[in-house]
Image (tube, rainbow, N blue to C red):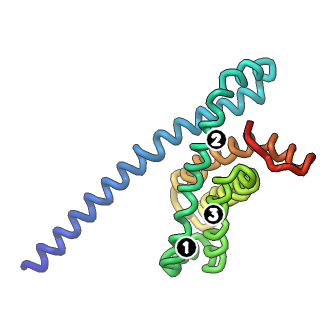
Amino acid sequence: MAIGKIRFGRFVLGFIDAKRFAFFEYTGYYAPNFFLSGELLAWLLFTWLAPVRRTTVKQLANQYLPSFDRWARIFIATTFIPGFGSFLHIKAAAAVFVMLGYNEAFMIFIKLLEGIGGIGVLFRQTTFFAALLLSVDMAGATYTHYHNYFARNMPDPFSNSTPSLVLQVFLVVLLFLHFRGMKVFVSRGTNPKMK
């Protein structure tokens, strides 16, 4: 009887913890980042579709760009660097990739790419290349979920792709911000710097 109560207690605590985690995940992570992603996407589209207003938009945005660049790179880094933790339990992490149609070797490659990319975005000299690699990685993640939806009848590709879609917007903005620096780097052989 006592053992049954202990097991029931653990079950209830686990359920509460899961509910709290889900609440945090959707209110503390997805909701604000969905909003910010939408704002960033609107900014990119506006500057592209309304060239006449680019000067005005640039004047308004310039004062915030250095701060945004710094915090966006920290956000991306803290999202991907923990991927190295998968190497502490490779079999469990690989099981998810196997379910998605990949193997353990591919999981190791992806986690290395994401971890190194997360470190790379912390340094302005490597932000462009790191963001480019991570952007391709996120595009591949989104493709995987939709491919499995149509080819293997796996459920809910949009919800499964939510993290990659949210992160993709931040990565594209980082690419946009650091593209000018990369042009200077390529043409002059100097380190790219945010201005």
Residue at the farthest front position: 190
Lateral position of residue 75 relative to residue 176, left or right: left
Dot 2 and dot 1 residues touching (CB under 8 Å): no
Specify whether residue 150 is in view: no
Q: In which quarter of the image is residue 64?
A: top right
Tell me if residue 7 comes above or below residue 73 in the rendering.
below
Residue carrying label 1: 99
Q: Name the residue under label 3.
A: 114
Q: Which residue was labeled with disc 2? A: 69
Q: Which of 81 and 157 is in front in this view?
A: 81
Three-letter amino acid code of the residue under disc 3 = Glu
Amino acid type, callout 1: Met
Residue drawn where x is 17% and y is 70% of the image = 8
At label 2, which amino acid type do we have? Asp
Q: Quadrant of the C terminus?
A: top right
Q: Residue 118: x percent and y percent? A: 62, 59
At mark 2, the secondary structure is: helix
Q: In this view, does 113 lie above or below 2?
A: above
Marks 1 and 3 close (CB-CB < 8 Å): no
